[in-house]
Every structure is written in C-alpha cells, then in structure tokens.
Amino acid sequence: MLGMLGAGAAGIAAAPYLQRGWESVLGAASQADPTGLTGLLPNPGGFRYYSVVGSVPRKDETTYRLRVRGLVKRPTTYTLADLRAMPQTRVVHDVLCTDGWRVERTPFEGVRLSEILDAAGVRSPGAAVHFTCFDGAYTESLTLEQARRSDVLIALKMQDAPVSHAHGGPVRLYVAPMYFYKSAKWLSGISVTDTVVPGYWEERGYAVDGWLDDADRHDAAA
Ligand SMILES: Nc1nc2c(c(=O)[nH]1)N[C@H]1C(S)=C(S)[C@@H](COP(=O)(O)O)O[C@H]1N2
Ligand SMILES: [Mo]
C-alpha cells in the first residue's frame, strides 16, 4: 500500500473504477467530464484519494508558490518557508465526503486563511474568495465571511505530518465545517472576487455552501 502511495498521482489516476455513492445523482455530468473522477485505494486510514485529473505535478520546497491576487491591496506570493514562518493553527474535526465516508477527529494544521487575507488587505468590492489548484482543473469558492472563519486553514499538515502529495500537498485548503469537497487540494491560487464563482463540483451540481449538518454557521468559536 505504501509503495502504491509512493507512486504518487500517476498511480492514483490509474485506478480503473469510479467510486460513486451519493454523487451518483451527478453520474451523467461526471461521465461526460473528459477529465473523469477518480476515487481509489479503498480506505487507507479511512481516507480515499480523489483527483479530477489524471496526473498532478509534484511541488516541493523550491517549486511551490501560493499566489494571492484579485481585489486586494497587496498581491502576495508565498513560498512554503513563508507559510511555515506564520502562526500555525491546529483544527481537529471529523472529515466527511459526500460519497458517505467519514474520518473522525482528523487534525489539520496551517495558517488561517483570515491571516492571509488580512495580510493582503481585501479591497472593495471584495466579497468572496476563489481558489485554484496546480492540478490545473479543480477550483473552489467561499464567501468572504466563510473564508474568515477561525476553522478555515491553508493546511501544511494533515494527521500531524506534512500534507502528502496524494492528499493535496504540500498545501491544501481545509474548510472544517463543510464537506471535504470544499477543501481544495494542491492549492496554488487565492483570488478575492466580488461574487462567489462556483467551483469545479459546484458547476456540476454541488451546493456552493457545503455546510456539514452539525456545523455552527456563525463561527461562535472564533
Ligand atoms: N484539487 C482537488 N481538490 C479536491 C478534490 C479534487 O479532485 N481535486 N476532491 C475533493 C473531494 S470531493 C474530497 S472528498 C477531498 C478528498 O481529499 P483526499 O483525496 O485527501 O481524501 O478533496 C477535495 N479537494
Ligand atoms: Mo468528496
């Protein structure tokens, strides 16, 4: 199993079947999707690995960049070292995919998105945040209010280890109060926009507001 994981995204993409459950309501749309949806490796540690593309380049210490753009006063580009040098927050919450699997009490650690937004300085009429990924395909969005929650992270660690390539490393988004599809893997861009731009799955029928049933929608803990 570890060997397969070591083979990376190419191995992941080779999984010859689609893992569909709740999402089968979207079956027609996903079958028409030329990039395909690949779920694979039945539950190592409870997680399944998803990518909407066949292979994803690896980014490391020297090649990884996170670009913050759009309706901000100070467009900024972060390296991994830059992100590590910022205050780190640890959030522990259950992870739930709409396919029906759940991994309980999973720790994520990284920089609060609110911190990144404050550093960039959101300017009018900024009201939402759009995320892009270096897989070249996946996108996600949050309202600015959601993005500023204390439990929304630019995650560098997952399960107390650096986020692996298969899990979207070196940097992924983690939106604790929402279904896991909101947590974009291989995060490379953050853009402040004036309206919510639906993400990859949202253009294919998912709710833009991906709240978990038990989520406190007003971040009382913040
Ligand atoms: N870039 C990218 N991010 C993504 C996805 C994806 O296919 N590509 N899938 C989403 C979905 S539906 C889920 S359930 C989780 C899966 O994360 P994992 O592969 O680390 O388990 O990532 C989310 N983020
Ligand atoms: Mo998912």
Image: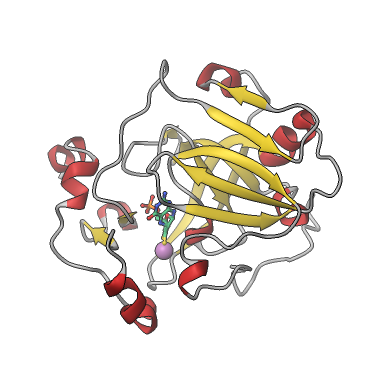
Q: Quadrant of residue 177?
A: bottom right
Task: Say whether residue 38 is left or right of residue 103.
Answer: left
Task: Say whether residue 204 is left or right of residue 176.
Answer: left
Residue farthest along the right direction in this orientation = 124
Q: Is residue 129 above or below residue 190?
A: below
Closer to the camera, 175 or 24?
24
Task: Say whether residue 125 is left or right of residue 101.
Answer: right
Q: Is residue 61 above or below residue 3?
A: above
Q: Is residue 117 above or below residue 119?
A: below
Closer to the camera, 18 or 158?
18
Residue shown at the point (38%, 79%) measured from the top left: 26
Q: Position of residue 156 (x, y in %)?
A: 50, 33
Q: Position of residue 106 (x, y in %)?
A: 48, 50
Q: Quadrant of ligand 2?
A: bottom left
Closer to the camera, 158 or 67?
67
**Which quarter of the figure is the N terminus placed in?**
top left
Residue shown at the point (44%, 46%) measured from the top left: 185
Residue shown at the point (24%, 42%) measured from the top left: 9
Residue farthest along the bottom direction in this orientation = 25
Q: Position of residue 107 (x, y in %)?
A: 51, 45
Closer to the camera, 72 or 61?
72
Q: Quadrant of residue 197?
A: bottom right
Residue shown at the point (66%, 23%) measured from the top left: 86
Q: Position of residue 142 (x, y in %)?
A: 66, 56
